[in-house]
Amino acid sequence: MPDQTAPQTDPQTHRFAVRARHLHGHHARVLDEPSPEAAAAAYLEDFAHDPDEDDAVAVIVRDEATGREQCFRVDLTTGETAPCG
């Protein structure tokens, strides 16, 4: 398992903590990705979650540098990512 406290080495990526919206923060996974949307998709590639009625999963993405949180819905069929609404 990579050291999640190590500094970033790629200036094109940002460190994000991502979790499914229905889970508490202790289930978050830290990922280095180029965008919050990419972090949301990468999180779901590694974890199985029960989709809602339209085959999507909502995830919360927190930028570790700024603390800003965003919610995204990821369509598990197409991989399309959109803001929660």
Image: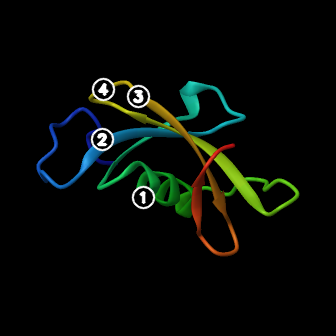
* Quadrant in which the C terminus appears: top right
Proximity of marks 3 and 4: CB atoms separated by less than 8 Å: yes
> Left or right of 81: which side holds 6?
left
**What residue is rendered at 30% in x and 26% in y?**
66
Counting residues from the start of the chain, the first of labels 3 and 1 encountered is 1
Proximity of marks 3 and 1: CB atoms separated by less than 8 Å: no
Toward which corner of the image does residue 48 lie, by quadrant?
bottom right
Q: Residues within 10 Å of mark 3 (few under 14, many from 20)?
A: few
The residue tagged 3 is 68
CA distance separating discs 2 and 4: 10 Å
State the image coordinates of residue 72 (x, y, percent, origin top left): 58, 47
The residue tagged 2 is 15
Amino acid bearing label 2: Arg
The residue tagged 4 is 66
Amino acid bearing label 4: Thr
Q: Residues within 10 Å of mark 4 (few under 14, many from 20)?
A: few
* Secondary structure category for the residue under label 3: loop
The residue tagged 1 is 38
State the image coordinates of residue 17 (x, y, percent, origin top left): 43, 37
State the image coordinates of residue 78 (x, y, percent, origin top left): 64, 75
Observer-nearest of 26 and 65: 65
Amino acid bearing label 3: Arg
Judged by depth in the image, the label closer to the viewer, 3 or 1, is 3
Q: Is residue 36 above or below residue 63?
A: below
- Name the colouring of the figure: rainbow
* Secondary structure category for the residue under label 2: strand
State the image coordinates of residue 49 (x, y, percent, origin top left): 72, 53
* Secondary structure category for the residue under label 1: helix
> Left or right of 66: which side holds 74?
right
Proximity of marks 2 and 1: CB atoms separated by less than 8 Å: no
**What residue is rendered at 78% in x and 56% in y?**
51
